[in-house]
Amino acid sequence: MRIFTIALGDYPHTEPLKTAKLGSPDFTLDFQTVKPVNRAFAPMARERKFDISEMAIATVLQAIAHGVEITLLPVVMAARFQENALFVRADSPLKGPADLKGRRVGVRAYSQTTGLWLRGLLAHEYSVAPSDIAWTTFEGAHVAAKTCWACCARARLTPPSSAPMRRAIPICACCFPTPKPRARRSSPNTASFPSITWSSSNRNWRASRALWRCLLRPSPRR
């Protein structure tokens, strides 16, 4: 019997597979422990580490575009609306997405799915093109191929202490994936368009912490 290595997140619809309630007599699934599951995206895109892997739509499309031999299956693991993943400080003078023209916005990676959807929304719904914003990133792309964008700059985070560098990066808004409702909590210092919510659940990544602290500086700047 053939064994397939697989990396999937924990969802109600994957539970029957992971607990062997649902299976096949023709093959066995060897589930790999990768938490959070987005840590499986880069190894899959760069070295095809697993036989099967959950992947963000932006990552898999970029991988295919750069010649990585993987196949996209029409099986959705997770989906959400991205509009309330764009955050500003609660005391920011910005009143809506259209005000982001000429401003600096932080995002964990320019290539991440949340940022991709938000750039599309800004362009099509608010006439704010990606080139109208100065983007600051804190991580590279999951796909190994080197890609540069003229409107995008990488923040320098120097270990072991990046606090001085964080304070030197002025951003007026940032993009974060929408938190799960059960993990959501209010924050008096941040506001999204239009809600005022933020979750710290599963935000352990160094780049995300740096991005969030840049936004929570004492005074909002460009």
Image (cartoon, grey):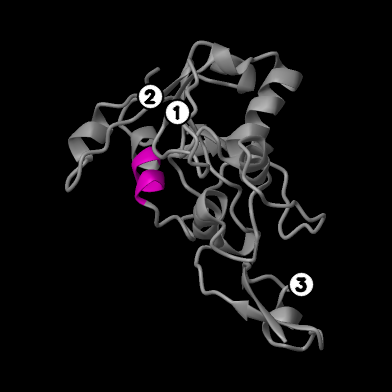
**Residue 139 visible, this orientation:** yes
Q: Position of residue 212 (x, y in %)?
A: 40, 41
Q: With respect to residue 44, does 30 lie above or below?
A: below
* Residue 96 appears in the picture as rendered: no
Q: Secondary structure at mark 2?
A: loop
Q: Is residue 151 found left or right of 178 in the rendered image?
A: left
Tell me the residue that label 2 is attached to: 220
Q: Secondary structure at mark 1?
A: loop
Considering only order in the chain, which callout, 2 or 1, is on the residue closer to the N terminus? 1
Position of the C terminus by quadrant: top left
**Whole-number angstrom distance, CA of label 3 to CA of label 1:** 40 Å
Q: Nearer the viewer, residue 209 or 37?
A: 37
1 and 2 marks in contact (CB < 8 Å): yes
Start and end of the magenta stretch? 206-211
Q: CA gap, disc 1 to disc 2?
A: 8 Å
In magenta stretch: residue 173: no
User: What residue is drawn where x is 66% and y is 49%?
Assistant: 69
